[in-house]
Image (spheres, rainbow, N blue to C red):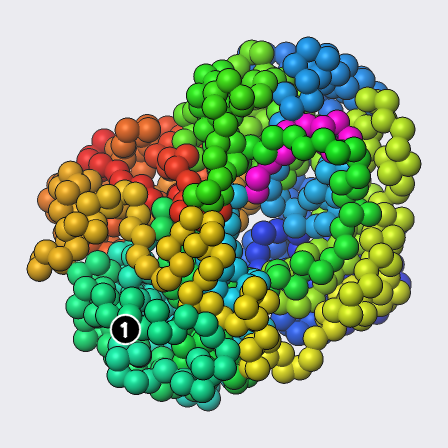
Amino acid sequence: MSKLALYEKNPAVRIVTGACPHDCPDTCSWQIAVDKKSERALDIWGRADHPVTQGTLCGKVDRYLERVYHADRLTHPLRRVGPKGSGRFERISWREALAEIAARLQGIINEWGPEAVLPYAYAGTMGFLQQHGISNRFFQQMGASRLAYTICSEAGFEGYLYTIGSTIGIEPEDYAHARLILIWGSNTLTSNLHLWPFIQDARKQGARVIVIDPARTRTARAADEWLPIRPGTDGALALGMMHEIVNADLHDKEYVAAHTVGFEQLAERLQEWPPQRAARITGIPAERIRELARDYAATRPAAIRVNYGLQRHYGGGMAMRNITCLPALIGAWREQGGGIQLSVSGQLRHLEKSGLERPDLLAGRIPRTINMNRLGDALSLDRTRLAASHYAPRPVDRKPAPDDAGPPVKALIVYNSNPAAVAPDQSSVQAGLAREDLFTVVLEHFQTDTADYADYLLPATTQAEHWDLQRMYGHHFLALNRPAIPTVGAARPNSAIFRGLAQAMGYTDSGFYEDDETILRNFIEAQHHPLYETVTWEALLEKGFVRLNLPQPYLPFAEGNFPTPSGKCEFYSERMAQDGYDPLPTYTPPKSEEGGTRSEEKENGSVQAEQDPHSLACISPPAHSFLNSSFSHLERFRGREREPLLWIHPHDASVRRIEEGAWLRVWNELGEVELTARVTEEIMAGTVLAPGIWWNKHSPDGRNVNQLTPQDETDMGASASFYDVRVFVEPA
């Protein structure tokens, strides 16, 4: 008997539909059983009638109620009483907290101006309301510095957008129709679980699944083939594949002629990229590159699933651009199950959000924008570093001179994020957070590494306790989240906290006095684009989720109609040329392989010839039981992961006299961390892998792998380069 069937027959229980808030493409629809008398949640499960959720939740969210009722939940406002970073607080009332915070912020604004206040947030929740809805109203009314949300996906998005115009792609359900699936830089069974059943359906019909990844992940072990690739070299593989497809005359001439621009220039560029050259860079044999290219061109339908890991290096934007050219080159978009998906969030570009976020409150002001990846620089009192923290996503953009960088950051308001654990260059971030003159407010569920540095710590509600509308980026269903239980303790939704702060600051706009349900209803009713005709407040209340108004099957580019300036897939992009890029696909090596383009022709295949021969490439994808730094504080999930590890190939371990289970010192010019060796052939030689993200306070040496990651920016979008790292490893 299903959980729904079990509980819906019980008159003492009510069932509330909601949606998972976390940063995952699955955006699952869930149901919570609540005891009517005690108003306590009893159980949680996935909606069986949701076409993607299909009744299951991942191993993390299936235990979400442990998070809601955990003994360590923050339930009352707290004020710091110990030194910065000590994590010592005293309980105060909401009235005291809001009044004191407002007074401190107003004092900073009076002395330094509103740009001295910096919000720092990301995807602790992906709901329109609790993520940025009311907080944007608050910071725009204030005129605070803006934050560029670059820590995850901007490089890949930019490369994708230059090529096909929008982050639109295959629906997950349509992977079931593919006959060849390339899972490229994505660990589906960890980070996109609900795509896997559709891939399995395809395999039952004879599809082959190939995983391209530096590590033999859970997904690679479950696939038909693992194709190991050196980190940051995916763009070279795509160029080698395209060379073979074009030179073997396997491209779809009709589709290319009708729906692309720049093929002749692309074909000329590809002559520089025979598979032999790509092989020397990627570590994949030339003959295997030829076979892969021929199979991809000949198998119909052919699908690619790419994810964000492969673009977290200096050349990440160009790598994604190169891969995104492939479906148009072979005409894969023509068929159901053919094409590519990075994200489908491009469908949200038609949303009318001005009524929700109220940009009019800026009243014509244009505050500076800080790149969230450079938080360490932003919090420095060195004006050169402050200038470097400004957002400049394209080569044609320029950062200000130090004297023009604006005021130092004097107040930091953190919500939906844990930068002390997740931001690059951890030592710099912690040094900034430890500044006695930095006023810091943190909204949180638990006392994270970042919370330890707060002056005021404000308890936020979990998804079980508030209203929201969940954005999606892996499928086409918007979902309404209804509060299932009363708030735990004195916790408040982000929306209520920012409303309270606005009122304490004396802001009188009516937008700071609306309740959450009214705000969401008005947001839905403000949508007039045909894409949202099916998304009504009544439909969301009735079912909990609604599919966007798209045809089924949805073949976005079967007849071209790309949302690019030309209306076609742009192998040659004039917009890229104007923005300062090479307008054609090319290879941009990682910064950590700065000798790569010069050493690639060496017959031994090494792209490390000009690096210290003792250094290794390091990547740090999510651990299976964690989601960024979420869940890593819960005992159940820490127990599953056991301890912070470093995967290292037997060859690399042998020359360093490292044995399985050994305690390791891992370091570079930024810092060091101690990890436990996992000696395995499931990682390429020359590469190590540190699953993350562990909280510092739960790591044996009080540090995590972001001690080693740089604040460097990618080629496009000024995104994070978490996988563009070189490290040294030795027994501790």
Q: Quadrant of residue 149?
A: top right
Q: Is residue 427 above or below residue 19?
A: above
Q: Position of residue 121 (x, y in %)?
A: 61, 37
Say whether residue 145 is magenta: yes
**Position of residue 126 measured from the top left corner of the image (x, y, whole percent):** 65, 50
Query: Where 550 falls versus 179 (above or below)?
Result: above
Q: Going by the picture, which residue comes out furthest to the left? A: 603
Q: Position of residue 405 (x, y in %)?
A: 53, 23
Q: Quadrant of residue 555?
A: bottom right
Can residue 207 be seen here? The reply is no
- Judged left or right of residue 362, residue 339 is left
Q: Nearer the viewer, residue 389 or 234?
A: 389
Range drawn in magenta: 139-149
Residue under label 1: 243
Q: Nearer the viewer, residue 683 or 633?
A: 683
Image position of 696 (left or right of 608)? right
Residue at point 81%, 60% (across, down): 527
| Quadrant occupied by the N terminus | bottom right
In the picture provided, is 361 more to the left or to the right than 372?
right
Amino acid under disc 1: His
